[in-house]
Image (spheres, helix red, strand yellow):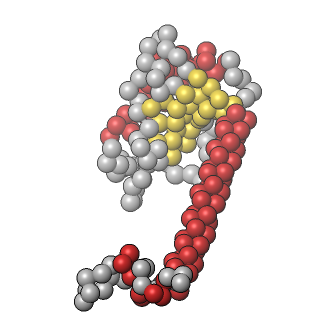
Amino acid sequence: MLEASSEKKKDVPYIEGLTFESWEMGKKLPVDDKDKFNNILTVTQLKEKFGLTIDGVTFTPENEIILHSNGIDIEVGDGSYLAVQMMNLGNILKQFEGQSGVLYMKDFKTPDGVASFKTKQMLENEAKKASEKKQSKDKKEEETTEDEDSDDEDSDDEDADDESDYDESSDYDEDSGDDWEDASNTDAYSEE
């Protein structure tokens, strides 16, 4: 730790996602994952080498790296291909100048690799559609649950009706050995 400041210095990228309990001026930051420091060093060196504008670096909980440049979030994965990705990043970013969104470069492993870009508007539309789809699904599940509850109530009513129409004379009589079919032939059921 060389300096502490409450203001962001120009051309110095901010770093998010590093956690440590304490720090001391002039001492090494106590971060468990050494790969994160190596990735930060790689980013800062390649940023200078290729003349890139990198506003910040974020480490996700899944240990993936997102670079931030002029309103574009650049997903580069776990850092395995940072050199190739950053070597090509300048030319790719020129195509999207003035736009904001997400540049997906996780699979950009060779100089002729493929990257994809989604504008902020595209991402908002996708999120809106996903939300509408979820609401529609939730509504259908709610209606299905209500229908099942209604069917259960109707079934309970029918069971109650069946019980009220219950005729003991139609039961099997253990003493006589007769079952309900025989009982239906008694005088009580004849039409004479």
Q: Residue at x 47, y 27 (%)?
A: 106
Residue 64, percent from left and from top: 44, 38
- Residue closer to the observer: 69 or 116: 116
Q: Position of residue 186 (x, y in %)?
A: 42, 84
172 or 61: nearer the eye?
172
Residue visible at 68% across and 42% down? 129
Q: Position of residue 88 (x, y in %)?
A: 53, 16
* Residue 180 against residue 18 in the figure, above or below: below
Q: Which residue in the rendered view is the most extreme toward the front?
A: 192
Q: Position of residue 54 (x, y in %)?
A: 58, 31
On the picture, is 126 further left or further right than 37?
Answer: right
Residue at (58% x, 67% y) in the render = 151
Left or right of residue 107, residue 70 in this image: right
Residue under the image location 25 percent in, 82 percent down: 177
Q: Residue furthest top?
A: 112
User: Position of 151 compared to 170: left or right?
Assistant: right
Q: Is residue 61 visible?
A: yes
146 and 44: which is toward the camera? 146
105 is higher (above) or lower (below) than 88: below
Q: Quadrant of residue 81?
A: top left
Quarter location, residue 34 = top left
Q: Is residue 46 visible?
A: no
| Above-or-below relation of 164 to 109 | below
